[in-house]
């Protein structure tokens, strides 16, 4: 069953994309719904110990490399105009059935890079934020 609710963004880990304290319409993720790179999701990863809003950066089976603000997926650069530069360096091999979630304000985000288990299982993704289209103020779409 599809549900909708408002998600309050806590903290600054998603700025400037999502401002702390802002409310965003959210749609539940049903088991068959696709999850795409770039999606803004509400997740309950066991490693985080709480519900979080993050961006999907790595998909199942991919190798994601972070090198001082530059992100590559399976060796191809990932354009991330929404993300701030970061000092972090690391490699993540995303297991089948799991996703790599990061905040847009990279050096101010508690995300996969700091969690004891860096990957969120598909069942831990509970919703997708609905995005406003900049060209049509006020309209929403599933992002």
Image: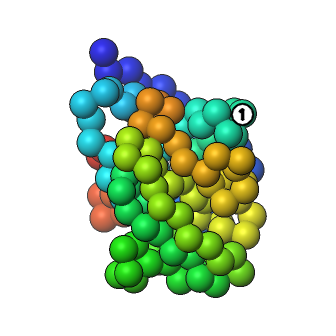
Location of the N terminus by quadrant is top left
User: In this rendering, does residue 28 appear at all?
Assistant: yes
Percent position of residue 17, x then y: 55, 62
Viewer-proximal residue among 130 and 33: 33
Percent position of residue 88, x then y: 69, 76
In the image, residue 67 above or below residue 58: below
Residue 142, picture quadrant: top left
Residue 58, picture quadrant: bottom left
Residue at x 53% of width, y 83% of height? 70
Left or right of residue 92: residue 143: left
User: In this rendering, does residue 57 appear at all?
Assistant: no
Viewer-proximal residue among 62 and 101: 62
Viewer-proximal residue among 43 and 4: 43
Percent position of residue 122, x then y: 42, 37
Residue at x 44% of width, y 45% of height? 98
Q: Residues within 10 Å of mark 1 (few under 14, many from 20)?
A: few
Residue at the disc numbered 1: 49
Tell how many labels. 1
In the image, residue 52 above or below residue 31: below
Q: Report the colour scheme.
A: rainbow
Percent position of residue 60, x then y: 37, 52
In the image, residue 118 above or below residue 44: below
Determine the secondary structure under disc 1: loop
Residue at x 61% of width, y 51% of height? 118
Left or right of residue 29: residue 93: right
């Amino acid at each position: 069953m599809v549900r909708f609710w408002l998600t309050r963004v806590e903290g600054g880990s998603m700025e400037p994309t999502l401002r702390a304290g802002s409310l965003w319409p959210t749609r539940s993720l049903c088991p068959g719904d696709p999850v795409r790179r770039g999606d803004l999701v509400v997740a309950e990863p066991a490693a985080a110990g709480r519900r979080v809003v993050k961006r999907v950066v790595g998909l199942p089976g991919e190798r994601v490399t972070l090198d001082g603000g530059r992100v590559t997926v399976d060796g191809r650069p990932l354009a991330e105009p929404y993300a701030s530069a970061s000092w972090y360096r690391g490699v993540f091999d995303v297991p089948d059935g799991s996703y790599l979630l990061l905040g847009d304000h990279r050096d101010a985000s508690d995300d996969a890079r700091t969690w004891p288990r860096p990957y969120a299982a598909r069942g831990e993704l509970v919703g997708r934020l609905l995005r406003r289209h900049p060209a049509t103020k006020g309209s929403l779409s599933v992002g």
